Structures are given as C-alpha cells and as structure tokens.
Image (cartoon, rainbow, N blue to C red):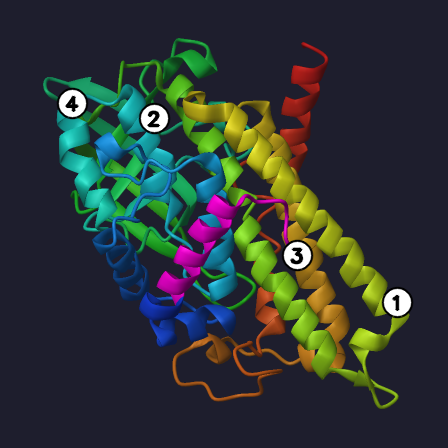
C-alpha cells in the first residue's frame, strides 16, 4: 500500500527503514509485534536511541531540540516506526505537555523540562479525568488553593495512564470555585514524589494495570509550576487535547496491524486453503485497507494545514476515525484467528513466554489486542463527545 510520494520523500522513507533495521533492538521489536507488555525501561531505551540520532522529538522545532520535520516527514516516520515494530513514543511528554510549554510556559519551565522530556529523564502523566469529570472535564473538582508561594492541591484523578512510572503530572485544578466551570481552572506541573500523592492501579480487561487512580491529599506545589496564567487552564487544556486526539489516529499502528491481519489470513486455513483465498475475507481486508489509506491521507492533510496553530475540530475527526479503525482491525484479527483467539492469559504478555505464533515476527496474543482496543474510543474524550464538538463547529452552535 503506497500513496503518491516524491523521490525525495521515498529517499527519506528509506533512511528511516535503514535506521529501524540497524538500531531497533530485536527484543523491543519482538515485544511490540507479539503484543506483549512494554516495561518502563523499554520505553526509556528506545527514546534515548532516537534522541542520540537526533530523532527524539519528530514534531518539535529544531530550536527546541526537535527534528524540524515537515508534516509529511512526521507521517512517514510514524508509519515506518509502526510497521517496523518500534514502541510508540510516549505522548504525554513529547506531544502533549511539551507543545503547551513551548507556547504558554515560562522560559524557566521550558529550560527545565523540555531537555528532560527528550531523554525521558522525566516521565509525564496526565491529570485530567476525575470520577464524575471524564467527558465532562470542565466539571472537575480537584482544588488548588494559593498559600504564599505555593498551591495546596487536594482531589482525585482517575484513568491516569502509566502514573505508576511517572515523575511528573500536568494537572488540571480548580483555582476559582466561584467562576463558571471553564473560567476557574488552572494547569499545574506536579512532582509525583511530593508528599500526599497516592497511586493505585486499575486492572483492565487484558490483565495489566497501566491505568491508575491518583489521590492528592494536601500536595504542596510551587507557584512557579503554574503554566501560563491562573484560571486560564482551560485554554491550555484544549490546546493540549488537540495534539492528543490527533495522535490517537495511530496510522503507523494501523499499518502494522493491517500487515498482521494479512499474515494471519495466510496462516489460518479453511477447507485446506488459506483464509486469504476466501472471497469474503479478501473483501473485508480490502475494505479496511482502503479505510487505512483514507485515514493516512486525512491525517496528512490535517497535519499540513494545522501547522503551528494546533489542530482544531479536525483533531476530533481524526480521533473518531482512527480509534474506530483500530477497533475494526482488532475485530478482524478475531474473525480470522477463529478458535485460536479464544484462549488468553495475561502471562502471554510477559517476557519469556514461548507460545504459539502465527508466523515468524507476529504475535500470538490476538485476544489481548482485541481487549486493549476497547479503550481508544473512550480516552482522549469519548467519541460521542467528539461528534458533539464536530456538530457544534459545523452548525456554528
């Protein structure tokens, strides 16, 4: 599956492929292609390999330590990383809080945090959702009260991905309870080692606990960790969410899983023939491949037009389409694997498991992938909420 790229684009793509072939550790590749659980050190190791090559921040400007790549180059990088089986770079630092700090943060915050994001010396998590304030994020109740040169933060966050590893949290807090919901919110940077923070894991369907609830009980946060202006956090939150939702499209992820589906269809047999020769299976694969191509073109157009202003309502379109497509791919995995998809145990995701594999380089854990893909239509703002955002924009409500 190839779109129309120039010779220069193709040369750049070949450079990425060569890098992946030479520098992507085999153990990391095998984990990703087999849908196995990645540890903290796996992410750190891969990020530092990319950073040592100057590719640690594909979306950042050169002045901040990034690549300065065009939208098309970033798209090609995402695709080739996905196909090669590279771990996805952690979005929380690189593509969520970093753009906010570049645009709204103080010079001191930029100097302190951006270099450490590049090397993953600081691991970030997102303190947005709360019990009762998920899709309706503006109703959050976590309080931050100014006392001298500090804020005192009390409240609870939930569905906090990878908080068990995090060094820092970017956290939405209510600093003016008398203002209307969106107007009384501030964005604070909180050291996760601060007294008063408790992280509790929430096991998910596929048997891992990478999401958490985080309790903040009188946590003391320096006033210098306020991003931008007090009570203007909703503006920064929306800017950040635009970057998050665009990334959820996961085109490289889709391309890799499409390749997985094709390999699975070659392996699985019905009536003595590979399922890939079944006209109904071929039709399903062809339809989803066309949808992946359409997503790729849409992502390129949105990224090109958004430039440095950040994505607007287009990010909601990408979030919906990308998350639905990832779920459709996982469902097709199940359809093709048939009875082989039924048994699943969490230990299959661990290091050292030597179980059934459909083909060299591909993973056995079809069931875990399917279960994991129930999440994308929920996180980053549910797809139902995204449709409401699109409707309001279209009808100028």
Whole-angstrom CA distance, mark 4 to mark 2, is 22 Å
Which image quadrant: the N terminus?
Answer: bottom right
Residue at (66%, 23%) from the top-left corner? 390
Locate residue 127, reporting x and y percent: 36, 37
What residue range appears in magenta?
2-20
Helix, strand or loop under label 4? helix
Residue 161, compared with residue 68, is above or below; it is: below
Q: Is residue 108 magenta?
A: no
Q: Which residue is mark 4?
A: 107
Between discs 3 and 2, the one toward the N terminus? 3
Locate residue 265, reporting x and y percent: 73, 75
Q: Is residue 19 magenta?
A: yes
Helix, strand or loop under label 2? strand
Q: Residues at badges 3 and 2 in contact (C-beta under 8 Å)?
A: no
Q: Which residue is mark 1?
A: 280
Q: Which residue is mark 3?
A: 1
Density class for disc 1 (Cα within 10 Å; few <14, some 14-19, many ≥20) is: few
Given residues 104 and 21, the one toward you in this image is 21
Front: mark 2 or 1: 1
Q: Is residue 267 shown left or right of residue 75?
A: right
Density class for disc 3 (Cα within 10 Å; few <14, some 14-19, many ≥20) is: few
Whole-angstrom CA distance, mark 1 to mark 3, is 20 Å
Density class for disc 2 (Cα within 10 Å; few <14, some 14-19, many ≥20) is: many
Residue at (54%, 56%) from the top-left corner? 253
């Amino acid at each position: 599956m190839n779109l129309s790229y120039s010779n220069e684009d193709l040369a750049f793509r070949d450079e990425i492929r060569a890098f992946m072939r030479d520098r992507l550790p085999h153990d990391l590749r095998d984990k990703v292609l087999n849908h196995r659980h990645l540890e903290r050190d796996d992410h750190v190791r891969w990020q530092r390999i990319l950073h040592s090559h100057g590719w640690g921040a594909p979306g950042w400007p050169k002045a901040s330590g990034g690549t300065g790549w065009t939208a098309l180059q970033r798209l090609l990088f995402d695709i080739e990383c996905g196909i090669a089986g590279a771990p996805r770079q952690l979005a929380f630092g690189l593509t969520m809080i970093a753009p906010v700090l570049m645009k709204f943060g103080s010079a001191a915050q930029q100097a302190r945090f951006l270099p450490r994001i590049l090397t993953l010396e600081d691991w970030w998590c997102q303190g947005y959702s709360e019990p009762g304030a998920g899709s309706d994020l503006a109703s959050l109740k976590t309080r931050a009260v100014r006392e001298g040169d500090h804020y005192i933060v009390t409240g609870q966050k939930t569905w906090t991905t990878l908080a068990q590893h995090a060094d820092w949290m970017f956290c939405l807090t209510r600093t003016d309870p008398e203002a209307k919901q969106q107007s009384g919110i501030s964005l604070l940077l909180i050291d996760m080692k601060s007294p008063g923070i408790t992280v509790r894991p929430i096991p998910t369907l596929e048997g891992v606990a990478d999401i958490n609830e985080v309790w903040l009980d009188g946590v003391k946060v320096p006033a210098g960790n306020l991003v931008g202006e007090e009570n203007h956090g909703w503006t920064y939150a929306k800017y950040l969410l635009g970057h998050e939702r665009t990334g959820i499209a996961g085109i490289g992820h889709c391309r890799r899983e499409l390749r997985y589906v094709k390999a699975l269809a070659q392996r699985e047999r019905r009536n003595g023939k590979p399922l890939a020769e079944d006209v109904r299976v071929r039709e399903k694969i062809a339809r989803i491949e066309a949808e992946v191509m359409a997503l790729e073109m849409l992502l390129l157009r949105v990224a090109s037009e958004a430039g440095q202003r950040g994505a607007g309502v287009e990010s909601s379109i990408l979030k919906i389409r990308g998350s639905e497509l990832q779920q459709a791919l996982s469902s097709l995995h199940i359809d093709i694997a048939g009875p082989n998809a039924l048994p699943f145990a969490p230990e299959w995701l661990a290091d050292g498991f030597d179980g059934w594999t459909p083909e060299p380089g591909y993973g056995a854990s079809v069931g875990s992938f399917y279960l994991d893909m129930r999440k994308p239509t929920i996180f980053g703002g549910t797809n139902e909420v995204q449709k409401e955002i699109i409707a309001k924009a279209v009808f100028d409500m």
